């Protein structure tokens, strides 16, 4: 029994050692996989991964970055704070292929023009990175995500600088316009992103910064040079999506339609109030409460988290946090004089927001426009109402 146990331990040790020292054969190939967008917001931007294939060794695996670490303590709190560690994954290529084909997402493959040493260095790096003590990393949507990791790891493995030329026929874009390419202008994902992220993402981006999107990793690698030769040796579409249109929102329930209906209701109730000389109290309480709560959330995203893109958010000009704390005045027919001054201040804030939008300091959700007009109409009516009461 002892002899069998010793042999088993020795076999496990040898297998472990072999896996740690696996040498790729000259027939091995390394490639970058680019997966098309999915139909949900969390996969609307696509995905990148490395594929290491060596039939001589019976190896065909895919390493990808950006997996959720659901076992992390306080997962949701850390996610909201921007302090959540993400994971590198290692899967069989056959499993990955079946998964993405099932979800009808395009799979493109770019085989890298790496020499034997560079292939081995890439595999060693990924294999070491996948160890339990190494596989977690602090994620950043724009600067350290599933796409930028591919570029960074490729640079390290090549042992020399890969030259990324500007993508041909590409106009200068901002982070926000690049996001809109993936989620559209009239979707709830776009609406939420445009409210949550600040003016920081409205500056023009460089070619390297575009690479936070998987499709631009594909384009950048396509034009890149490694030691005066193309970085990509060959390109192949492994699977082409048949019906997947990416992330969309039903037009009837889209932000623009819903906000138009909501704004029409606000303006109608305001018109009715002006005719009757009364005030729909519950409407004002809801508007001040909603804008105040959204404003507090935006402040927390700006100052209470490590997210790099939520700062300098001028949505606070309409979602004003103090609105939540002056609701008490709305229950009264006779208000304090300072409250009329506060209403004037809110009108000025909306005017400033319009100037920010026109000048280009920050681009706001297009679906907000009718709501902002309705909000302005309501504030002006309240000024007139409290002047006569």
Image: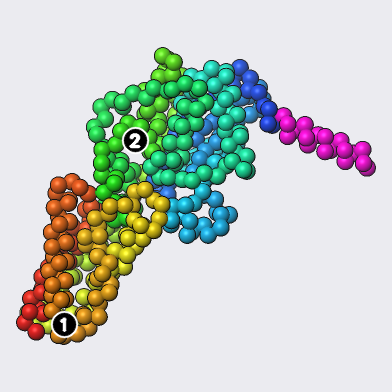
Residue 224 shown in magenta: no
Q: Quadrant of the C terminus?
A: bottom left
- Residue located at (32% from left, 65% from top): 296
Q: Secondary structure at mark 2?
A: helix
Q: Quadrant of residue 384?
A: bottom left
Q: Which residue is mark 2?
A: 210
Dot 1 crowding, Cα within 10 Å, few <14, some 14–19, many 20+: some
In this rendering, position of residue 281 left or right of residue 70: left
Location of residue 174 in the rendering, given as x and y in whole percent from the top left corner: 27, 40
Location of residue 303 in the rendering, given as x and y in whole percent from the top left corner: 35, 57
Q: How many angstroms separate mark 2 from mark 1 (CA)?
A: 52 Å
Q: Which residue is mark 1?
A: 335
- Residue located at (51% from left, 20% from top): 114
In this rendering, position of residue 28 left or right of residue 32: right
Whether residue 355 is situated above or below residue 131 in the rendered picture: below
Could you tell me what secondary structure mostly forms the magenta stretch?
helix
Q: Quadrant of residue 368?
A: bottom left
In this rendering, position of residue 24 left or right of residue 273: right
Q: Quadrant of the N terminus?
A: top right
The first of marks 2 and 1 along the sequence is 2
Viewer-proximal residue among 300 and 107: 300
Is residue 205 visible to us here? yes
Q: Which residues are magenta?
A: 1-18
Whether residue 310 is situated above or below residue 117 in the rendered picture: below
Q: Secondary structure at mark 1?
A: loop
- The mark closer to the camera, 2 or 1, is 1
Location of residue 175 in the rendering, given as x and y in whole percent from the top left corner: 30, 42
Is residue 98 visible to us here? no
């Amino acid at each position: 029994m002892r002899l069998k146990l010793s042999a088993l331990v020795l076999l496990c040790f040898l297998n472990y050692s072999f896996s740690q020292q696996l040498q790729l054969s000259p027939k091995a190939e390394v490639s970058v996989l680019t997966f098309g967008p999915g139909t949900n917001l969390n996969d609307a931007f696509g995905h990148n991964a490395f594929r290491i294939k060596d039939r001589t060794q019976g190896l065909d695996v895919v390493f990808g970055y950006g997996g959720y670490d659901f076992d992390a303590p306080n997962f949701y709190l850390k996610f909201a704070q921007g302090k959540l560690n993400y994971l590198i994954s290692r899967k069989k290529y056959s499993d990955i292929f079946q998964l993405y084909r099932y979800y009808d997402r395009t799979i493109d493959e770019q085989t890298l023009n790496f020499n034997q040493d560079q292939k081995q260095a890439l595999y060693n790096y990924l294999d070491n990175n996948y160890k339990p003590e190494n596989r977690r990393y602090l994620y950043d949507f724009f600067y350290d995500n599933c796409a930028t990791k591919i570029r960074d790891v490729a640079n390290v493995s090549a042992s020399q600088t890969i030259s990324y030329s500007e993508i041909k026929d590409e106009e200068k874009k901002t982070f926000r316009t690049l996001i809109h390419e993936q989620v559209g202008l009239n979707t709830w994902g776009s609406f939420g992103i445009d409210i949550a992220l600040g003016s920081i993402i409205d500056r023009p981006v460089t070619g390297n910064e575009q690479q936070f999107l998987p499709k631009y990793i594909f384009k950048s690698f396509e034009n890149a040079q490694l030691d005066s030769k193309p970085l990509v040796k060959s390109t192949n579409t492994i699977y082409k999506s048949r019906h997947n249109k990416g992330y969309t929102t039903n037009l009837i329930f889209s932000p623009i339609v819903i906000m138009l209906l909501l704004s029409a209701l606000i303006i109608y109730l305001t018109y009715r109030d002006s005719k009757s000389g009364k005030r729909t109290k519950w409407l004002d309480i809801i508007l001040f409460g909603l804008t105040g709560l959204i404003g507090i959330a935006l402040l927390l995203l700006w100052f209470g988290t490590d997210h790099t893109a939520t700062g300098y958010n001028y949505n606070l000009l309409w979602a004003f946090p103090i609105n939540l704390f002056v609701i008490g005045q709305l229950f009264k027919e006779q208000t304090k004089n300072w409250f009329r001054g506060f209403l004037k201040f809110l009108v000025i804030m909306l005017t400033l927001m319009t100037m920010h939008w026109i000048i280009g300091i920050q681009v706001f959700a297009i679906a907000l426009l009718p709501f902002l007009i309705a909000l302005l109409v309501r504030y002006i009516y309240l000024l007139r109402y409290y002047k006569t009461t």
